[in-house]
Image: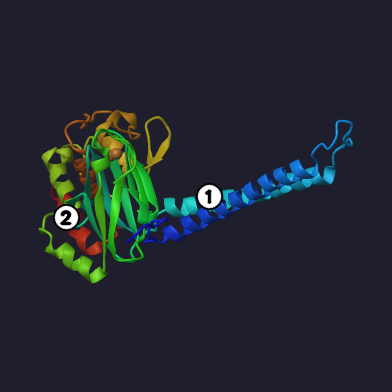
Amino acid sequence: MGFRLFPEQASTLAPQVDHLLFFLLAAAAFFTVAIFGAIFYFAIRYRRRSDRELPKAIHGSVPLEILWSVIPFGLTMVMFTWGASVYFTGRSAPADAIQIDVVAKQWMWKLQHMEGPREINELHIPLGRPIKLTMTSEDVIHSFFVPAFRTKQDVVPGSYSTTWFQPTKTGKYHLFCAEYCGDRHSGMTGWIYVMQPEDYAAWLSGETPGATLAENGRKLFQDLACANCHKPDGSGRCPALAGLFGSTVSLADGTAVTADEAYIRESILRPAAKVVAGYQPLMPTFQGQVTEEGVLQLVEYIKSLSPEPKAPSQSRDRQGAVRNP
Ligand code: CUA
């Protein structure tokens, strides 16, 4: 071990972030040395040598003005485009990413795999696959920080934030909370275990074979009697939900919205916020009746009702179950 200035690089993003940082450091160091060097050089070279000495008046130089405006402008544009490109790489998860749901609370991380296993302060993931996190908080703002992945994303109560990373090395990496969240903030840590794909598969199958997230969501959907109104054939008082996820929904106020995770969450907790065109605002709020984990399960269930599901083998029975609730 010993002292290390930088955390290990263990994700595809890590070298990109580091290269940008080194460029910024090098640019800052170069100009710091150049400016201080010039200050000292000129202070000595042009110091006043006698009381009668009068300096020569200077009337400026247009080429010089242009030069020292254009060079910094070019340099900041390089920083801007480079930084923006790294930022967007870190923002947009690949479509084939493995989905993990994260609920933060004082003072722990609760992580749910789509296949069902749930973990606390530990996350097991396979090597070489992109991992996308959908995160929310039960109480205050937390921040999901894995230095080795150069990943840091605030986790905010009342909304979903997302981030993604692709690990490049197996091993055990520290997870921190990077937003002060109360007196045990410093203890809100965990470990990310990056495993060989076959070890990960073994780990997954070794976990208690509970229901998948979507199946738990379906159960919750039944327990809350959602299907009384959201009839699968569309004959109910509320819209049918199959194929909803990812579609464009026309609202009663004439606007339209894309049905993403945040929209579904809001519709469960604040149904009156966005009423679908042609429907009455009849739905009661489920705020306080469903936990954040439950809401995520419902979201996964509704996602699984898409006409083009990601995992056809699993979603067939899920959809079948919806047709006969
Ligand atoms: Cu959670 Cu700091």
Q: Which quadrant of the view contains residue 251?
A: top left
Measure how far apart labels 2 and 1 are at the Cα level. Answer: 36 Å
State the residue position of label 2. 117
Using the rendered image of the protein, determine whether residue 241 is visible from the camera's viewpoint: no
Q: Is residue 32 left or right of residue 311?
A: right
For image coordinates 80% across by 45% down, the residue present is 64
Instruction: Give the residue furthest to the bottom.
Output: 198
Q: Which quadrant of the view contains residue 10?
A: bottom left
Q: Position of residue 4 (x, y in %)?
A: 39, 57
**Residue type, label 1:** Ala
Q: Is residue 211 left or right of residue 164?
A: left
Using the rendered image of the protein, determine whether residue 252 is visible from the camera's viewpoint: yes
- Which secondary structure lies at badge 1? helix
For label 1, the crowd category at 10 Å Cα-Cα, with few meaning under 14, some 14 to 19 and many 20 or more, is few
Quadrant location, ligand no. 1: top left
State the residue position of label 1. 84
Mark seen at residue 211: none
101 and 192: which one is in front? 192
Please determine whether, in this image, residue 226 is positioned above or below residue 2.
above
Q: Position of residue 76 (x, y in %)?
A: 62, 47
148 and 157: which one is in front? 148
